[in-house]
Amino acid sequence: MVGLANGIAHISFDGGGIVMPARNSYDRQLVAEQVTAHARKKGRVQILLEEDRWMVYGRQPHSGAARCSWCGSRMQPICYRSDQGETAYCLPCALGEEPRPASASPMLGIRRAS
């Protein structure tokens, strides 16, 4: 799909972009901080990470308290994987910041970016 090297996150937004390492949970936390900051300022951010393309919205595109399809937490910002349509995730689940047991599966049966 995307074809980027593993461990590299390409973050793009209106007016610019950033390439950052995303090799481990610490790197991904830093990516999440950058994405959150730019999503709040610009409204929408794209992340290319490994084989996934994520669209991140700083403001929820619909009313109501959206919850993550993986962990059930409230989301701000809200993330959608480009090939999953309306299935929404929180940023930590989208970026794979939190380690999950191998047997864990998302609430809706969709693979999490790791």
Image (cartoon, grey):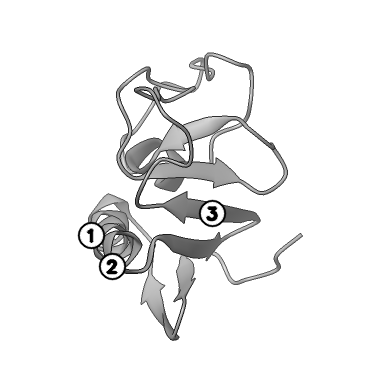
Q: Nearer the viewer, mark 1 or mark 3?
A: 3
Q: Give the labeled residue for mark 1.
A: 33
Find residue 41 and name its label. 2
Quadrant (top left/top right/bottom left/bottom right) for the N terminus: bottom right
Residue 114 visible in image? no
- Mark 1: give few (<14), some (14-19) or many (20+) Cα within 10 Å: few
Name above or below for residue 42 compared with residue 78: below
Residue occupying image coordinates x 28% and y 67%: 41
Q: Position of residue 43 (x, y in %)?
A: 39, 61
The answer to whether 17 appears left or right of 77 in the picture is right
**Label 2 to label 3: alpha-carbon separation:** 15 Å
* Residue holding disc 3: 55
Residues packed near mark 3 inside 10 Å, few (<14), some (14 to 19) or many (20 plus)? some
Q: Classify mark 3: helix, strand or loop.
A: strand
Q: Is residue 72 left or right of residue 81?
A: left
Q: Position of residue 113 (x, y in %)?
A: 53, 43
Identify the residue at image location x=55%, y=43%.
Answer: 80
Q: Amino acid at mark 2?
A: Lys
